Amino acid sequence: MTLDELIAGVEAAPRGPRVGAFFDFDGTVISGYSAAAFQQDRLQRGQMSPLELGRSLLAGLDMKVRGAGVSSLMRIAARSWAGHAEDELEQLGERLFAKRIAGMVYPEVRALVQAHRRRGHTVVLATSATRFQAEPVARDLEVDHLLCTRLEVAGGILTGEVLEPVLWGEAKAQAVRELAARRGIDLRRSHGYANGDEDVAFLEVVGHPRPLNPDAGLAAHAKERGWPSTRFSSRGRPGVGSVLRTGAAIGALSGAAALGLGVGLVNGRRRDASNLAASLGGDLALAVAGVRLNVTGEERLWSHRPAVFIFNHQSSFDIPIIASLVRRDMTGVAKKEAARDDRANSANAREALKPVIDMLQDGISFAIAPEGTRSATPRLRQFKKGAFHIAMQAGVPIVPIVIRNAGDVMWRNSFFVRPGQVDVAVLPPVSTEGWTVGDLSERVARMERLFTETLESWPNGRPATTGGRRAPSAARAR
């Protein structure tokens, strides 16, 4: 079963919260295991003793060879956190989510979750992991309920004990049945997603079991029961092709820059050199990386120049994307200028921005990410005012460029590019005539809402596969 067929099945389901969508976490929502990120962090910080490491390896081997449950591993992890404050673990979970786990989320699962949300279904993440591992992902996906293994806390400090049951096997299935009874969810009409044979009981609870990336054991069960399976290849370790394409893309950018420099030295015109490097480098990098652009509103890239082009920032690959789109008479702005807030109204700040204003008035456009830095997920970070101050002071329009899924081809912390299509919507230019410092906050908020709405309701009518809203409050944990 393809992703499109999965989503079509969701869209054909009845509307409303009585239909549940139950997702396993490790290996299903994310590629790999969240516990590995926590263990690796402790190893790097020298916080894991050889004895604990040995016990963890033996427990993991026991799971692999004899099919033992995850309880032993959970108890080892719980003991290692004994004496730590609960909020310390929450902060660790958030840090590891931004650093690593966010990039492990399958974009296809994001699409599935959003398909269920569009139908008004009750979305649940059910996992043997702790809330410190799973809650940041649940919050980012706007999951309604989080069912997870709980650790004992006394006075805000972890005791090192696990509160039974560990949500594994039949215990997870029972937790789903209990939640469904409390929330009035009709399990016969509900959907379940998992990847391991330990979740057969969990999948049997729902009327529409859907194995995702099933291991050998679950694949055999699925075949016996006639459950349609789906495999994704958008995450995990990059193949040789991705490594070679990434090297070729870097080479293309470097070669275009060198060629542009040569042209500039020959004719003495820096702008020609910059234009050649941007347009040729961007086009070549996209081509050799196997990345295609699907652009809506491309004519708006040329209708109002010079301008301040603003774009949402998910990926290092945003740079060749913007270069290929804007192509000529364009440069970027350093973070310190882009991040300027109300301070940009001071005399010193205006003086510091004067070279930028002069270049705009000389016909050079600027490309700026108002979030200030790359987002760990497809959700927007809060917009800063720097780009808007610059456009207002120079008297040039702002051209919004909304990039939907650059993080799918190259996530924020990844070194490798994957082939794929990136959707881009160029929105109508926004005049800054009549803008004042006093109303700038509302104008920035309005632009942020415009990006959010575009990400949620894509201009060509195709359902968005990545969300635009910043993360809401935490999902409710069991």
Image (cartoon, rainbow, N blue to C red):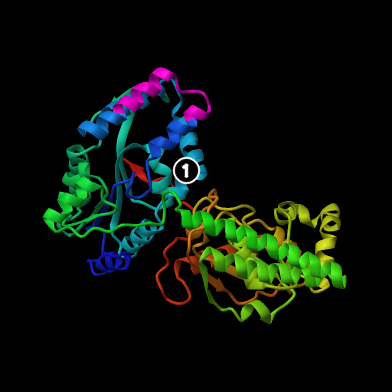
Q: Is residue 439 visible?
A: no
Q: Residue furthest left?
A: 224
| Above or below, comparing residue 298 to residue 183 in the picture | below
Q: Would you say 469 lies left or right of 181 here?
A: right
The residue under label 1 is: 97
Q: Residue at left 36%, top 51%?
A: 143
Magenta-drawn stretch, dominant element (helix, strand or loop):
helix
Q: Nearer the viewer, residue 288 or 204?
A: 288
Span of residues in magenta: 42-59
Residue 292 x %, y %: 51, 70
Q: Amino acid at mark 1?
A: Phe
Q: In which image quadrant can residue 309 be found?
A: bottom right
Is 478 above or below relative to 117? above
In which image quadrant can residue 211 be found?
Answer: bottom left
Q: Is residue 120 left or right of residue 272?
A: left
Does the magenta-highlighted stretch encompass residue 46? yes
